[in-house]
Image (cartoon, rainbow, N blue to C red):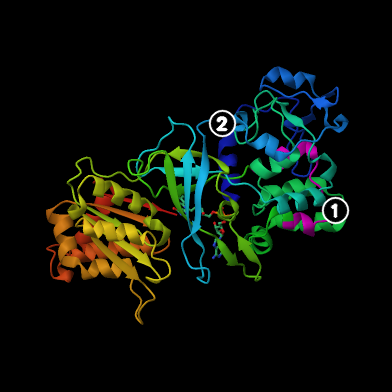
């Protein structure tokens, strides 16, 4: 915030003077809404259903007058609600691949693309917008006194010419409901930020709540302690501030869109045409207040049944295999980071390049979380080298970087002499740095195989990743 203030103050002298009608912005005053939720008129007992045209907007009535109720299911499977670039897929597999008593639930999820023309490139990332749980939606509606409005058919109308409805919301004129908006579009499980507390401050008349909200607005540490650290959700915040209600007039502005989650695709399109395979770890942890938290997208994916539809899009790869298949590659992917490596491994085997491929995979235990074990056996049978680091299977912990160091002779030969490409994927904690450090060690004199000094080796590996196009990372 101080940075923002300084930046705005630095820009102000260069801007034209304000117009005579300009009113200084008051953080406690309620700005006029940008959008309006309008209820569809009811004709002969049934709603006028739209075909998506903007002309529908002018025929709607204020939302209070509608009688009809429609369900979320009637609305969410329609083509018109899809964001540009998204495509439908049907769930064909949702299998837990770790034992029930293992600390982490990791799932292989397979989605079959409905559109025969839809496809993705190897190494692409799949982007999915999750849904809020029905329990969260119910609770939000109840806390906001909006239960009666939840299932009325309504449309969104733009009220300001230069503020179009964001793409994350249904197009103006399309029938939706408040329940559909809260389920599919607006994030009520998000952790509130300063702007949310500023909105709440405008909506409450309760003095004690005003006082508390003023403290949040004035001091980022208060927000950190109350909201960020315990990952408190918007629904929980509303439960704490019982006198504060988000009005329908501003709900589309106050609530942020549900953020899409990205997943590295674990399948190669050549080996699994029209299918997308993902390896997804369920986010499930306890906060500093010992409250259980589950990730929005992973917990929603967990509930999906075979045959259910998911709208997804593909993002261009950040990892690219070398153009010439016989260039050697080293794939390093601990945990779910192995997902894109599995896709690459499938293609390398199909290309007959097993002998030019090494995979480093890290897990905790060979018997509990050794994902895609059958694929690695097949890879080995096709001359690929597969190195597995089960960190907890022995008294001393072993990680992928330790195996890389053990293989210093081969690593030095592949990186320096054979000019191989290296790929790292997985957690963005200390792993990528440790792996790069291990690679540098292998090609340095310290390992006994390399010819470079320690500094030269580090710079060599950095160049591979930053400039040389021989190294790439996908971490999260
Ligand atoms: C390019 C890319 C590729 C990815 N590929 C994969 C993949 O192949 N497989 C996969 O499983 N994921 C992958 N992810 C991560 C994935 O996108 C989601 O972030 C992840 O599934 C969690 O989403 P969620 O909605 O379930 O959790 P959210 O509701 O978004 O919650 C996650 C948040 O919870 C908090 N949190 C989580 N654990 C803890 C903890 N132990 N303590 C305290 N706070 C915690 C953190 O603030 C975290 O940001 C990838 C991410 C990117 C960017």
Residue 14 numbered tag: 2
Mark 1: which secondary structure? Answer: loop
Magenta residue check for 9: no
**Residue occupying image coordinates x 12% and y 55%:** 417
Rate crowding at label 1 as few (under 14), some (14 to 19) or many (20 or more) other CA atoms within 10 Å.
some
Residue behind label 2 places its C-beta within 8 angstroms of ligand 1: no
Residue 51, percent from left and from top: 67, 21
Q: Earlier in the sequence, mark 1 or mark 2?
A: 2
Residue 255 visible? The answer is no
Disc 1 vs disc 2: which is toward the camera?
1
Magenta residue check for 238: yes
Residue highlighted by disc 1:
243
Q: Is residue 142 above or below residue 106?
A: above
Residue 136 visible? The answer is yes
Residue 208, percent from left and from top: 85, 59
Q: Residue furthest top?
A: 55
Rate crowding at label 2 as few (under 14), some (14 to 19) or many (20 or more) other CA atoms within 10 Å.
few
Q: Who is closer to the viewer here, 66 or 100?
A: 100
Question: What's the magenta region?
Answer: 236-256
Residue 89 numbered tag: none
Residue 326, percent from left and from top: 17, 46
Q: Is residue 88 above or below residue 229?
A: above
Q: Tell me the quarter of the picture where residue 439 sits.
A: bottom left
Residue 162, percent from left and from top: 65, 25
**Residue occupying image coordinates x 60% and y 41%:** 9
Q: Who is closer to the viewer here, 139 or 47?
A: 47
Q: Is residue 320 left or right of residue 21?
A: left
**Residue occupying image coordinates x 56% and y 48%:** 3
| Label 1 – label 2 distance at C-alpha | 43 Å
Quadrant of the drawing holding the C terminus: bottom left
């Amino acid at each position: 915030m101080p940075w923002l203030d300084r930046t705005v103050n630095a820009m102000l002298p260069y801007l034209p003077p304000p117009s005579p009608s300009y009113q200084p912005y008051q953080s406690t005053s309620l700005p006029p809404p940008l959008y309006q939720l309008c209820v569809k008129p009811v004709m002969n007992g049934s709603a006028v259903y739209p075909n998506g045209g903007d002309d529908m907007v002018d025929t709607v009535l204020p939302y209070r007058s509608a009688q009809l109720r429609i369900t979320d299911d009637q609305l969410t499977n329609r083509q018109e609600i899809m964001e540009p670039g998204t495509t439908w897929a049907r769930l064909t597999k949702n299998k837990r691949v770790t034992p029930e008593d293992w600390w982490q639930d990791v799932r292989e999820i397979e989605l079959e693309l409905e559109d025969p023309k839809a496809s993705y490139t190897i190494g692409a990332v799949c982007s999915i917008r999750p849904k809020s749980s029905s329990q969260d939606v119910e609770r939000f509606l109840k806390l906001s006194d909006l239960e009666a409005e939840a299932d009325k058919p309504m449309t969104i109308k733009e009220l300001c010419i230069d503020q179009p409805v964001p793409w994350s919301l249904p197009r103006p004129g399309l029938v939706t409901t408040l329940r559909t908006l809260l389920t599919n579009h607006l994030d009520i499980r998000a952790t509130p930020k300063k702007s949310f507390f500023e909105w709440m401050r405008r909506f409450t008349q309760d003095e004690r709540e005003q006082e508390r909200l003023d403290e949040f607005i004035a001091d980022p540490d208060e927000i950190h302690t109350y909201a960020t650290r315990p990952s408190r959700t918007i629904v929980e915040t509303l439960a704490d501030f019982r006198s504060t209600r988000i009005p329908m007039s501003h709900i589309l502005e106050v609530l942020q869109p549900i953020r899409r989650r990205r997943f590295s695709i674990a399948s190669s399109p050549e080996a699994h045409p029209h299918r997308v395979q993902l390896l997804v770890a369920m986010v499930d942890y306890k906060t500093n207040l010992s409250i259980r938290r589950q990730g929005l997208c992973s917990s929603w994916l967990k509930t999906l049944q075979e045959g259910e539809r998911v709208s997804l899009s593909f993002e261009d790869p950040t990892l690219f295999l070398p153009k010439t298949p016989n260039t050697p590659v080293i794939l390093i992917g601990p945990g779910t980071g192995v997902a894109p490596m599995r896709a690459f491994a499938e293609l390398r085997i199909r290309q007959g390049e097993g002998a030019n491929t090494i995979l480093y995979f890290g897990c905790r235990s060979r018997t509990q979380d050794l994902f895609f074990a059958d694929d690695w056996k097949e890879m080995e049978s096709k001359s690929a080298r597969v190195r597995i680091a089960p960190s907890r299977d022995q008294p001393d912990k072993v990680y992928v970087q330790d195996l890389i160091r053990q293989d210093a002779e081969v690593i030095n030969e592949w990186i320096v002499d054979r000019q191989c490409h290296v790929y790292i994927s997985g957690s963005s904690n200390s792993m990528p740095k440790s792996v790069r450090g291990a690679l540098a060690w292998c090609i340095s004199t310290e390992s006994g195989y390399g010819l470079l000094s320690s500094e030269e080796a580090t710079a060599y590996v950095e160049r591979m990743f930053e400039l040389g196009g021989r190294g790439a990372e996908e971490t999260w």
